[in-house]
Image (tube, rainbow, N blue to C red):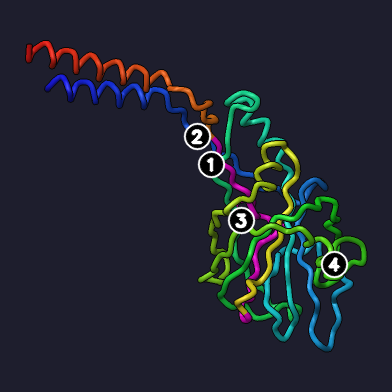
Amino acid sequence: MSNHRHTLLWASLLMLGTAQAATTVTLRPDSTGTSNGDAFVTTGSASTDLSGNNYGAAGALAVSAALSSGTFASLLRFEVSSVKSTFDSTYGVGGWSIDSVGLQLTTTTTMNPIFNASQAGTFDVKWIPSDSWVEGSGNPMTPGTTGVKWTDFAGLSSGAEAQGAFTVANVGDGVTATYTLTPSSSLLYDILSGSPVSLTMTADALDNAVAVLFNSRNFGTSARRPGLIITASAAVAAPEPSRALLLMTGLVCTLRRRRIRSIL
């Protein structure tokens, strides 16, 4: 092997040696506790006003365009303080950056007439600044009056920031998919600071037919509950030449000197 190839090989190995593996944490809250939460809200149909009802204890989260049974939207709140603690322990306080954020959801079906018939389509995920909304204990059979309702939704959505638009192609029961968000600076700040993360799911403005149900945190099987999946790695150092880059430069200079000597 030539000296030049030796140099490139050693430089590559040095660069690999400085890399640190990424760490992934998945939050999948159950129905206990108030720091986490999820709920759907709805207008109800033209003949049945459901805008003042709470459905926080339902087993499903609904997203729907304005169809015969009404418009549906859902909210989710994740307590991320444990995520910050994990990354701080792994990389040191302030020593990590976020690589990706994903929202994992599992579709479900229901015969309850409150919902629109399931239909594939596109939904939007947005970050909202308010984390103080109350999940509530209502469900489709016995709606509540305490907790988040459709009449609260517009106010809660003020200042919302888009995290992506996603297509659900299969609305059958038990289909799990992870939707990779394009996190806004506010969402990243919440994770970096360990603050709660609140998200909304609504029908995309360009889709007037989507209607989909997802399992809520009340669902019995943990793996099918909503999950927030966060991956982080060591923060990139300040723009100084890295040790590996300095060594590589030195090796290249040494090789050049050797070649000059051989010519002379």
Q: Earlier in the sequence, mark 4 or mark 1?
A: 1
Q: Earlier in the sequence, mark 3 or mark 4?
A: 4
Tell me residue 41's x, y (percent): 79, 69
* Residue at far front of view: 264
Q: Which mark is residue 149?
A: 4
Residue bearing the label numbered 1? 99
Left or right of 55: which side holds 254?
left
* Residue at far bottom of view: 47
Query: Do tag 1 and tag 2 residues touch (Cβ < 8 Å)?
Result: yes
Magenta part of the protein: which range? 208-232
> Between tags 2 and 3, which lies in front?
2
How many residues crowd around disc 2 within 10 Å: few (fewer than 14), some, or many (20 or more)? some
SS for dot 1: strand
Q: Earlier in the sequence, mark 3 or mark 1?
A: 1
Q: Earlier in the sequence, mark 2 or mark 3?
A: 2
SS for dot 4: loop
How many residues crowd around disc 1 within 10 Å: few (fewer than 14), some, or many (20 or more)? some
Tell me residue 171's x, y (percent): 56, 72
Using the numbered discs, state the Cα–Cα distance from disc 3 to disc 4 in whole angstroms. Answer: 25 Å
Using the numbered discs, state the Cα–Cα distance from disc 2 to disc 3 in whole angstroms. Answer: 24 Å
* Residue at far right of view: 145
Q: Which mark is residue 22?
A: 2
> Between tags 4 and 1, which lies in front?
1
Residue bearing the label numbered 3? 224
Q: Amino acid at mark 4?
A: Lys
Tell me the quarter of the image containing the C terminus: top left
